[in-house]
Image (cartoon, rainbow, N blue to C red):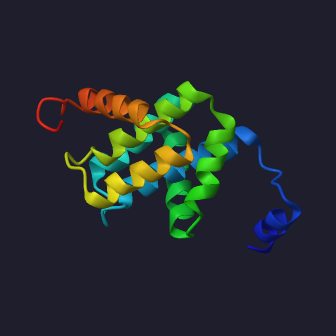
């Protein structure tokens, strides 16, 4: 705990930038998955799959990254910090892809809850993803999940 506080006061982190990005993405995905008050197996599996695909890592490493994301959410790591890391590390297309990943997670249980919809609007704003691009990312996520016929 003191090491993390010391890092924050020093204004940076010695952590590898790629690992910081992975952890931030994992925390955002976990935040989206758990916002409705529960974490279903399908949501966990979706987050791990998306992490493995996006960062080209083996499933076991994605599971570890998911666990780190859960811990970060439990430790109340700020949404702003994680979105800042992603905004600073990803170009516009990658940020739109991150939104698509988040849409997949919030729809993994087949429903979009009010809190999840609010979170998605906040994250889109923090990542500087325009509403139109977020809407397109949502449609792609629904299609990928096979939900595009009934949840428009």
Q: Which residue occupies the extreme left position in the image? A: 150
| Residue 36 position in % (x across, y down) | 30, 62
Q: Is residue 53 left or right of residue 41?
A: right
Please name the residue shown 32% across and 27% down the image.
140
Q: Which residue occupies the extreme front position in the image? A: 131
Please name the residue shown 65% across and 48% down the image.
84
Quadrant of the frame with the N terminus: bottom right
Which corner quadrant of the image does residue 76 belong to?
bottom right
| Residue 11 position in % (x across, y down) | 84, 59
Q: Is residue 141 left or right of residue 7?
A: left
Judge whether residue 112 can be spotted in this image: yes
Please name the residue shown 41% across and 55% down the image.
119
Judge whether residue 57 can be spotted in this image: no
Q: Is residue 91 left or right of residue 139?
A: right
Q: Is residue 24 left or right of residue 18?
A: left
Which corner quadrant of the image does residue 48 belong to?
top left
| Residue 56 position in % (x across, y down) | 55, 27
| Residue 15 position in % (x across, y down) | 78, 49
Q: Is residue 45 above or below residue 79?
A: above
Please name the residue shown 49% across and 38% down the image.
51
Q: Is residue 52 above or below residue 47?
A: above
């Amino acid at each position: 705990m003191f090491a993390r506080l010391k890092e924050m006061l020093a204004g940076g982190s010695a952590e590898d930038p790629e690992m910081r990005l992975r952890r931030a993405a994992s925390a955002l995905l976990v935040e989206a998955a758990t916002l409705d008050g529960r974490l279903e197996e399908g949501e966990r599996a979706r987050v791990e799959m998306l992490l493995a695909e996006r960062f080209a890592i083996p499933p076991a490493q994605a599971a570890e990254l998911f666990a780190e994301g859960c811990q970060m959410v439990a430790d109340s790591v700020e949404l702003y910090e994680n979105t800042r890391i992603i905004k600073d590390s990803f170009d516009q297309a990658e940020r739109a892809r991150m939104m698509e990943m988040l849409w997949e997670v919030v729809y993994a249980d087949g429903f979009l809850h009010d809190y999840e919809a609010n979170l998605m609007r906040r994250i889109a704003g923090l990542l500087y993803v325009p509403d139109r691009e977020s809407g397109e990312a949502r449609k792609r996520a629904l299609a990928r999940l096979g939900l595009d016929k009934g949840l428009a």
